[in-house]
Structures are given as structure tokens and as C-alpha cells.
Amino acid sequence: MKLTISMIIAVAVAVSGASAFAKGKEQKMPQEQVVTMEVTGEGFVPAQVKVKANQPVKLVVTRKTDRTCAKEIVIKDFGINKPLPLNQPVEITFTPTKAGSFRYACGMDMITGVITVE
């Protein structure tokens, strides 16, 4: 079988197009946003955090005190209710799909904070 110049060009174009498509696909993968938070005598620290919409979020929450009612974290808008054992980091993952301010609180709804999604 003879290879013609037009066949070689067609194969080269197909390969380079597939390579460009794969590279473009890699660049569009959303990066996980990691937010570290502690529960102290002051409450949730920081009490206000900002994240981007449509990108996965990993909250890492560590309760550092036993003198608090914040022994769990509740984020109603995202269906999250997680216990916070003393001195153990708890990872909470979710992906916010719309912009806005979303409240989080302890189980008694006394200690609060806000996640702002941009």
C-alpha cells in the first residue's frame, strides 16, 4: 500500500487535533478548593470563607476545644451535618453550583459562619 502525501497530512492533522482536545480537557478539570477551619473558644475560625462556584470544596474542620456547643457542623443548604470529634480533622466535601452566601452553624444553631460562593 502506498502512502500519499494527502494521507500523511490527514493522519498528522487527526493526531494533532486529538492531542489538542486531550490537553484542553485537562485544563478544564476544576481544582479542589481546600478550606481549613477550627472550632475554638471564639467559635468557627475563620467565620467567613470564600470559594468559587462549580469547583469542589474540601472543608477541613478541627475542633480544638471541649468548651463549646460546636461539636458538629451543619450546612443546611448543602445537606451537611457532621460531628466534630475533639482534635480530629474532619473532611467535608461538596460542590457549590450557585453563587450566594450560605450559613453554617453548630447543631444548636448558636455559633455560626458564612460561606460566600462567587
Image (spheres, rainbow, N blue to C red):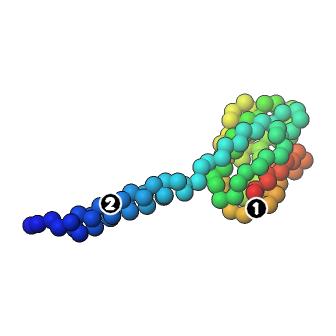
Q: Position of residue 5 (x, y in %)?
A: 21, 66
Circle 1/circle 2 CB separation < 8 Å: no
Q: Is residue 113 left or right of residue 27?
A: right
Q: Is residue 82 left or right of residue 112?
A: left
Q: Residue drawn 49% across and 54% down?
A: 26
Q: Nearer the viewer, residue 76 or 99?
A: 99
- Which quadrant would residue 9 be assigned to in this image? bottom left
For the question of whether residue 107 can be seen, the reply is no
Q: Position of residue 105 (x, y in %)?
A: 83, 49
Q: Residue drawn 45% across and 55% down?
A: 23
Q: Is residue 35 left or right of residue 44?
A: left
Q: Residue drawn 61% across and 48% down?
A: 32
Number of numbered discs on residues = 2
Say above or below: 19 vs 89.
below
For the question of whether residue 53 can be seen, the reply is yes
Residue type at tag 2: Val
What is the CA distance from the residue labelled 1 to the residue labelled 2? Answer: 39 Å
Disc 1 crowd, CA 10 A, few/some/many (<14, 14-19, 20+): few
Q: Nearer the viewer, mark 1 or mark 2?
A: 2
User: The C terminus lies in which quarter of the figure?
Assistant: bottom right
Q: Position of residue 17 (x, y in %)?
A: 38, 62
User: Which label is found at residue 20?
Assistant: none
Q: Position of residue 25 (x, y in %)?
A: 48, 58
Mark 2, residue position = 15
User: The N terminus lies in which quarter of the figure?
Assistant: bottom left
Q: Secondary structure at mark 1?
A: loop
Mark 1, residue position = 99
